[in-house]
């Protein structure tokens, strides 16, 4: 007998279920490997998969065996150490097999598991979210509105369409009673002609009258309206974009930002870009570069343009406020912002930045994250000091320092870690 096994549902991933079980079981090891890989990658290499090494001892399975018990007689051929009647100590219970490297240099390799691109990014962004999503729930739950979509034979009595139902009933009555009416008219005409030549007692007259009465009964038995005729207004759900969010990405590209600082800023915003585009369906990103003047740019120019100049941070904040006013009304949009700078700014401009944030931007923004690319023990600049006042004035404003690429992931997680609500 030929047996055919159809595995087309899984396609090439015939072991997809087992693979997901493995990922869930060793998620701790996998997440640590993902964190380490992110710190070493370039911007353009962020989304590829990763090979993860898991120590063999962590994936070993416990085994059960039958231990030696009781008194046994054993023969050791060619033995020069023991004689008949000697008692031998019972060996230790268990049959564990060591996995460590022996004195001879032999051992067992670590287990290597290859994460796909999707699995890698899923583990990376698993427990992150945009904080303070207080207006609406974004993207994960689509919202709908009811729209008319013709008629249906079933529904609520309140949705009955009387006109459509009566038209259907009329058409049915015409279709069912029409042939009988034509026959009735013909029979009545024949009776009238026959009565001109014979009297009422003639058998043909009696037969015609019986036929006419039968036709009238058939016509009367056609119901005026039937359940088959009733039609209901049909309404279906149509998705509507009722929830929206926008993220403003502000990056300092002034002369004080060296290539090293710019690279860290780009890595941070690349991480933010991947997180937003993968986790949310309806979100817009606005990219703003600034030195002495601020300019809204596209994604390519934001990450790769070499334009530079002096430093006036307030120019970026003013441009952000103008764009919000023109394109993103706060009643319809969840608004977020992330800013990266080395903290170097004109001393007279930093208080203006503080006032712009407290009085203009933060009342409209759900969450504002500021990262300063500088050493933790470096002296605080005027911008950091003024932003500290903003942080104390509003819980929506958070700030962190970055010094090296390997700090990007911990800082990013601290800024966008999921907040569990009861």
Image (tube, helix red, strand yellow):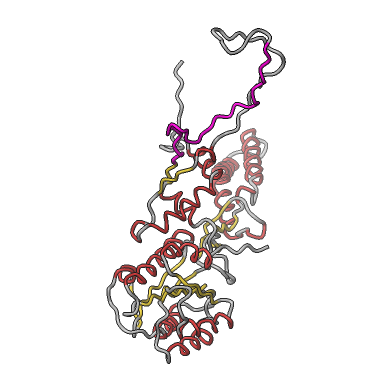
On screen, residue 87 versus residue 413, left or right, reads: right
Q: Is residue 315 left or right of residue 390?
A: left
Q: Extreme bottom residue here?
A: 348
Residue pictured at 42% horizontal, 54% vertical: 37
Query: What's the magenta region?
Result: 86-112
Task: Judge whether residue 167 can be spotted in this image.
Answer: yes
What residue is at 49 percent from the left and 57 percent from the top? 125
Residue 298 percent coordinates (x, y): 33, 71
**Is residue 13 shown above or below 130?**
above
The image quadrant of residue 331 is bottom right
Quadrant the C terminus occupies: bottom right
Q: Of 237 and 218, which appears nearest the observer?
A: 237
Total residue callouts: 0
Compared to residue 149, the image places residue 329 above or below, namely: below
Q: Main secondary structure of the magenta part?
A: loop
Q: Position of residue 188 (x, y in %)?
A: 58, 44
Q: Residue at x 52, y 58 (%)?
A: 149
Say which residue appears at 35% left-offset and 61% top-offset: 43
Furthest residue to the right?
Answer: 70
Q: Position of residue 348 (x, y in %)?
A: 43, 92
Residue 375 coordinates in the image, percent (x, y): 44, 73
Horizontally, is 116 left or right of 164 in the view? left
Q: Is residue 241 magenta?
A: no
Q: Quadrant of residue 180 in the image?
A: top right
| Viewer-side residue, 309 vs 376 | 376
Q: Is residue 196 visible?
A: no
């Amino acid at each position: 007998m030929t047996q055919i096994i159809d595995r087309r549902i899984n396609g090439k991933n015939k072991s997809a279920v087992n693979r997901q079980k493995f990922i869930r079981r060793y998620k701790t090891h996998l997440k640590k490997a993902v964190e380490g890989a992110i710190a070493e990658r370039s911007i353009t290499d962020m989304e590829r998969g990763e090979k993860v090494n898991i120590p063999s001892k962590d994936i070993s399975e416990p085994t059960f065996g039958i231990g030696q018990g009781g008194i046994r007689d054993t023969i050791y051929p060619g033995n020069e150490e023991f004689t008949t009647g000697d008692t031998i100590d019972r060996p230790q219970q268990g049959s564990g097999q060591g996995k460590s490297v022996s004195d001879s240099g032999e051992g067992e390799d670590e287990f290597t598991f290859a994460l796909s691109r999707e699995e890698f990014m899923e583990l990376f962004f698993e427990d992150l979210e945009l904080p303070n999503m207080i207006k609406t729930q974004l993207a994960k739950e689509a919202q709908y509105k009811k729209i008319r979509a013709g008629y249906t034979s079933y529904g609520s009595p309140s949705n009955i369409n009387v006109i459509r139902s009566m038209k259907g009933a009329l058409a049915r009555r015409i279709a069912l009673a029409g042939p009988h009416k034509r026959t009735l008219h013909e029979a009545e005409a024949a009776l009238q002609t026959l009565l001109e030549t014979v009297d009422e007692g003639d058998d043909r007259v009696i037969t015609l009258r019986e036929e006419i009465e039968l036709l009238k009964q058939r016509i009367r038995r056609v119901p005026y309206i039937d359940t088959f005729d009733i039609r209901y207004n049909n309404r279906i759900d149509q998705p509507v974009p009722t929830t929206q969010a926008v993220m403003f990405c502000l990056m300092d590209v002034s002369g004080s930002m060296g290539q090293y600082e710019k690279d860290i800023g780009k890595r941070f915003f690349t991480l933010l870009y991947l997180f937003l585009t993968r986790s949310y369906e309806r979100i817009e990103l606005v990219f703003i570069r600034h030195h002495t003047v601020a300019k809204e740019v596209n994604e390519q120019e934001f990450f790769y343009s070499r334009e530079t100049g002096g430093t006036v941070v307030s120019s970026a904040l003013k441009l952000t406020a103008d764009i919000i006013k023109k394109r993103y009304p706060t009643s319809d949009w969840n608004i977020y912002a992330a800013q990266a700078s080395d903290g170097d700014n004109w001393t007279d401009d930093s208080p203006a930045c503080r006032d712009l944030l407290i009085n203009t931007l933060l009342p409209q923004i759900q969450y504002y994250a500021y990262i300063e690319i500088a050493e933790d023990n470096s002296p605080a600049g005027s911008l950091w000091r003024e932003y500290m006042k903003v942080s104390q004035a509003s819980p929506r404003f958070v700030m962190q320092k970055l010094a090296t690429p390997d700090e990007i992931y911990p800082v990013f997680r601290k800024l966008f870690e999921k907040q569990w609500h009861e």
